Every structure is written in C-alpha cells, then in structure tokens.
C-alpha cells in the first residue's frame, strides 16, 4: 500500500461527508486506503461513515471507538493502524481541494528520501464569516525546513496539509497525550528524523469554528497553551535541544508580554516579561543582554517592530540552532532562520525578535 489517509472525526455529521468525498476524488497512480478513527460521536457521524464504508469496502476502514477517547488518544491509535508507506492526515472538519494532492506529495517524498514529511499551504476559512479567507503559509516559503524552526514557530497549519513517512514513529511517548493538541508534537516527532519539505500549493481548507479544539480559544490562551507545549518539549527532549527551546520560550513569552501590554493588562504583561527574562542565553553577559532587551521592548514596544523590519531588510537570521543529525549520523547545518516579518503562519501572530 502506497498511501494511507488518516481521518479523525467526532460529531462532524454536517461536514464529514465533504472530507471523505475530497479523499475519494484523488486521482493517483497507486492504491491508497482511508482509515477513519470515529471517536464515538453523539450525532450521525458514525452512520455517515458506515455508509461510505459499505459503499467503498475495499478503500475505507472504519475504526469505531467503543467510548470517546479524545483526540489525543484517537489520533495516534488511528495513525498506528495505517498500513501505507506514507500517511496523509485529514481532520474530519477540513477537506482537500485538489485531486492531485496525494500524488504530488507521494511523488515528493519518493524524490526526497532525506525528508521525513512534506506539507503545503492551507486556506483558513472562518465559518461565522467574521473575516475573509486567509492563506496559511510557512515563513519565507522555502523548499526545506528543519525541526528547530518548528519549535519557535508552529508553521504547519494543520494535520490536513501533511504527509509523513510511515514507520519512523511506531510508538508514541508517554508525554504525547499530556499535551492539548496532537499535530504539532506529531510533526516534531517526525521532524527529528529528517528535513521537512514544503510545496507552495494551497490544497486544503482549514475550517475555523467554535467546535475546533484550538481555534475556539481566545488569542492569549492560544499563546499560553503554546508556551506550555514548548516547556514540555524542553523537559522531554535531549540536552542538544535545550538552547533552541530556551530561545523559543523567550520569544513566545516576550510576544505574550507585549500582547498583554497592548491590551492594557500590565500585571500579566509584567508576569510574562519576567518569564522572558529568565530564558536567557548562557553566561552572565547573555543574561544581561536578555534582561536589557526585554526591558527595552516593554518600555518602547515599537522597538520590536523596528528591529524586526531592520532584520528583514538586512537578511539577518534570528537563530542558528543545533545541527540536525539525520539517520546517517552526518550533520547538516541548519539554514538561516527566516526573519520575523516573513513568518506568515505561526498559529498566533509573530514571535518577538
């Protein structure tokens, strides 16, 4: 089996058919399966999925949970049930827009054996009409990205844009299901095995609605949640990642401090400014620099914008991070990190420079 398509769904009776139909519309030169993890929905989602399984018994495998597991357990269980060489993910409330998506991504991974996954853009659509569609793309729109960049910016918008090599991750660590979202740590686990390839195409629609476990959160709560996830990464990953993760925490805490300052919450702004100061570079000089930087940004918020613009014009990288070591053991240098103004897609705004 060349490709498995993983769909997780819960209470999606109005939209799950569109997701499944967008997979069935794929034109490929290979066989693919659709593996649906139906998480004991309380509406008609399960019966709709069964109808599709009855109609396409050789294409669709329906995994009906006896009780609601929650996405953090349903997603990895469904993933481990996939048989394909590659696995393409699709959330039950999203859908694909191009019949060539599976073929193009599989061809890419065939041609780039050093990549552990590949991804593309998503069209973010707000169901309530509160704003118009927005294309979610990674910073700089480069052909290749590295895992250390993913620590600082969660630029892969949704699981619905990714295809990963199967069997790189065959066991999920104990810390995985303690996190609030499945896709970002899923990409991190795969990114530790190789590069991440990018195709500058928009082949998915990423719905933003009140039922989404991430999109329903207020902006500041999303940022706080992301800080908690990075802290978990720092606790559980190897010592070679400590410096990169400290930089990521510093940027995210400073960004949230500036957010609270803009919105008049000086108490919370001071709290996260202190946290940003603690995530200092090694040595007393680095700590002094970090504290001075945080103080300057908090007193003159426009300074962060000015620094970001200058770095963009001069092409100055924000961080280099450690070497990425593929399975061959030969290190590959991390590319220059994208300047902050190019970050078009971090889940909430841009991190402070």
Image: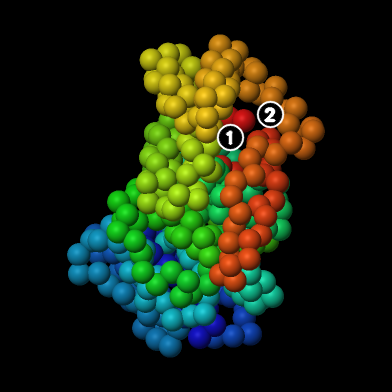
Q: Check disc 1 and report the residue beneath it.
A: 350
Q: Is residue 214 visible?
A: no
Farthest bottom residue in view: 58
Q: Classify residue 69 by image quadrant.
A: bottom left
The residue located at (62%, 81%) in the rendering is 28
Residue 308 numbered mark, or none = 2
| 250 or 308: nearer the viewer | 250
Can you say whether 159 is above or below 23 in the image?
Answer: above
Q: How is the image coloured?
A: rainbow
- Mark 1, Cα crowd under 10 Å, few <14 / some 14-19 / many 20+, is some
> Are discs 2 and 1 less than 8 Å apart at CB?
yes
Farthest left residue in view: 67
Q: Position of residue 70 (x, y in %)?
A: 28, 57
Distance Cα–Cα, label 2 vs label 1: 10 Å
- Mark 2, Cα crowd under 10 Å, few <14 / some 14-19 / many 20+, is many
Farthest top residue in view: 299
Q: Classify residue 221 by image quadrant.
A: top left
Question: Is residue 215 toward the left or the right of residue 72 in the image?
Answer: right
Q: Position of residue 320 (x, y in %)?
A: 64, 44
Q: Position of residue 290 (x, y in %)?
A: 55, 24
Question: Is residue 272 toward the left or the right of residue 112 in the image?
Answer: left
Can you say whether 141 is above or below 51 in the image?
Answer: above
| 186 or 349: nearer the viewer | 186
Can you say whether 299 is above or below 100 in the image?
Answer: above
The residue located at (46%, 21%) in the rendering is 273
Front disc: 2 or 1: 2
Question: Is residue 45 toward the left or the right of residue 124 in the image?
Answer: left
Can you say whether 163 is above or below 120 in the image?
Answer: below
The residue located at (63%, 23%) in the rendering is 304
Q: Secondary structure at mark 2?
A: helix
Residue 167 numbered mark, or none = none
């Amino acid at each position: 089996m060349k490709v498995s398509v993983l769909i997780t769904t819960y209470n999606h009776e109005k939209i799950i058919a569109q997701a499944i139909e967008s997979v069935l519309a794929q034109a490929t030169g290979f066989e693919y399966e659709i593996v649906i993890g139906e998480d004991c929905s309380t509406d008609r989602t399960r019966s709709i999925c069964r109808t599709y399984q009855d109609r396409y018994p050789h294409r669709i495998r329906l995994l009906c949970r006896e009780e609601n597991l929650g996405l953090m357990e349903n997603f990895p269980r469904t993933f481990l049930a996939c048989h394909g060489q590659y696995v393409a993910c699709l959330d039950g409330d999203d859908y694909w827009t191009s019949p060539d998506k599976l073929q193009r991504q599989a061809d890419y991974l065939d041609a780039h054996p050093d990549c552990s996954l590949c991804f593309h853009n998503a069209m973010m659509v707000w169901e309530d009409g509160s704003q118009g569609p927005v294309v979610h793309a990674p910073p700089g729109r480069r052909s290749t990205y590295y895992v250390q960049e993913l620590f600082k910016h969660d630029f892969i918008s949704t699981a619905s844009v990714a295809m990963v090599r199967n069997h790189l991750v065959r066991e999920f660590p104990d810390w995985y299901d303690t996190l609030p979202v499945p896709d970002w740590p899923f990409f991190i686990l795969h990114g530790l095995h190789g590069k991440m390839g990018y195709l500058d195409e928009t082949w998915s629609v990423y719905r933003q609605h009140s039922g989404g476990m991430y999109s329903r959160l207020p902006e500041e709560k999303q940022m706080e949640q992301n800080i908690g996830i990075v802290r978990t990464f720092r606790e559980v990953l190897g010592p070679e990642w400590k410096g990169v993760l400290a930089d990521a925490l510093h940027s995210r805490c400073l960004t949230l401090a500036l957010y609270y300052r803009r919105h008049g919450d000086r108490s919370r702004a001071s709290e996260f400014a202190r946290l940003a100061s603690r995530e200092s570079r090694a040595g007393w000089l680095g700590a002094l620099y970090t504290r001075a930087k945080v103080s300057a940004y908090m007193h003159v918020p426009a300074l962060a914008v000015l620094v970001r613009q200058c770095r963009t014009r001069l092409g100055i990288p924000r961080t280099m991070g450690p070497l990425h070591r593929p399975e061959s053991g030969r290190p590959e240098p991390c590319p220059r990190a994208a300047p902050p103004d190019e970050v078009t897609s971090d889940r909430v705004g841009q991190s402070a420079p």
